Amino acid sequence: MKTGTRYCLFVGGMIISVLICGINLMKKWNMDDDTEQGETLPAIPNATERRDIVSVSIKRRQENELDEISKNAGGRKSWIVTSTVFNKTYIKETTRPSALGEVIEHAKMVAKEARGGIVAVTMVNEAYLELTYSWLCNTANMSVHDNVLIIATDETTLQRLQKDWPRINTVLYSINNSELSYNEVGYVRYMLIRTRFLVALLISKIQVLLFEVDAIWFSSPLPLLQTLVHYDLVAAQISTRNHTIAGGFLFLQPSAIQVLNRVVYRLQKFMKIFSNIGVNKQLPVVVNDQTILQEVVVSQPNLKYKLLDFDIIADGQWYTRTNALNATPIVLNNNWIIGNRAKIARAKKFGHWFQDESGSCDWIRVRKITKIV
């Protein structure tokens, strides 16, 4: 065979090899993107399978990971790497090695004593303490505090809560954060961490009510939620967009775990794009736990979910309506306004602030506004 012919065959072979490698890489990229980094996501189970969704092997995997983290870290500050059902690293924070385990153990203890086994979870930092105290006064006579677990994200918040409200269940999970504004990088990262907590609690077979303290409870929602335990997910709606989930009030059964896993994965993937941007910078698009949850929920045909009417759980648009003073929901979320100062001012204007000038509970206001169930 002539040298020229051999050379042509050699070059042609190299070109074909490169093309084949390129095709394989494209296939792998598409597969990773479609199946969440190569992991085949199982479908939402039917009713007969739902009770087994959190398997023994999954729980053992989580426990082994927590044990390994604690053993290797030896009590010092360390990177916590948490895998969920699909054994993927979804989120990292610098915190104490046993912090996630402590949150789970506290939640289990609350669940044993809680009304209906529902654990009402919220995360607060020092910037939210005033709102937290007003909410605690608001709900003090509703027989709901035994259901509450407050995750404090800094030592000061934990210490003040334990001093001023010693009967409230509190636990520390340290996160570097301050007052957060909607759609800032820090805000979305905070929501990502919060969703990660929900996954951990659902793995532990805990019924979770996620709520926020910048809210007014006219009566306890727990009796209503106890009648809705046959749904995987119960949520409030955004008043300006019908059939759209509002992320500030979510009631979750362990059978919703795969939905929350998808939310965590997709939000983690989105935030990687902005990993080098400061926490106070606004994101160019609105993507957060709430928007992704909406997309995931409507894509699951076997998921049993219910969106509560606006006269049950209302949002901040309630304050702008002409019939606001006459229509009383069970819960009113004081949102659709930016900044804690603005939220407090609006609550005071409408008689929805439950602390007096000395910082004590305003019991006259509490009795006037709330209904005991």
Image (cartoon, grey):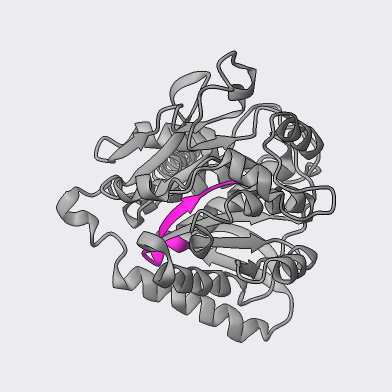
Which image quadrant is residue 336 in?
top right
Taking depth in this image into account, of 30 and 66 the one nearest to the observer is: 66
Among all residues in the image, which is located at the extreme top? 322
Q: Is residue 192 magenta?
A: no
- Front residue of this view, candidates 250 and 182: 250
Residue 59 against residue 189 in the figure, above or below: below
**x, y percent for residue 56:** 30, 72
Asked if residue 9 shows in the view, the reply is no
Residue drawn at x 41%, y 50% is 222
Q: Please state the horizontal and vertical placement of residue 309, each as a whole percent of the image.
A: 40, 28
Seen in the image, is 312 located left or right of residue 354? left
Q: Is residue 177 positioned above or below 155 on the image?
A: above
Name which residue lies at 75% across and 35% down.
Answer: 348
Is residue 277 shown above or below 149?
above
The answer to whether residue 243 shows anywhere in this view is yes
Residue 75 vs 133, above or below: the answer is below
**In the rendered structure, does residue 205 fall within the stretch colored magenta?**
yes
Q: Nearer the viewer, residue 345 or 157?
A: 345
Q: How many marks?
A: 0
The answer to whether residue 366 is left or right of residue 109 is: right
The magenta stretch is: 201-212
Q: Position of residue 19 (x, y in %)?
A: 46, 36
Q: Quadrant of the N terminus?
A: top left
Instruction: Determine the residue located farthest toward the right in the rendered image.
Output: 358
User: Outermost residue toward the left?
Assistant: 48
Q: Residue at x 36, y 31 (%)?
A: 298
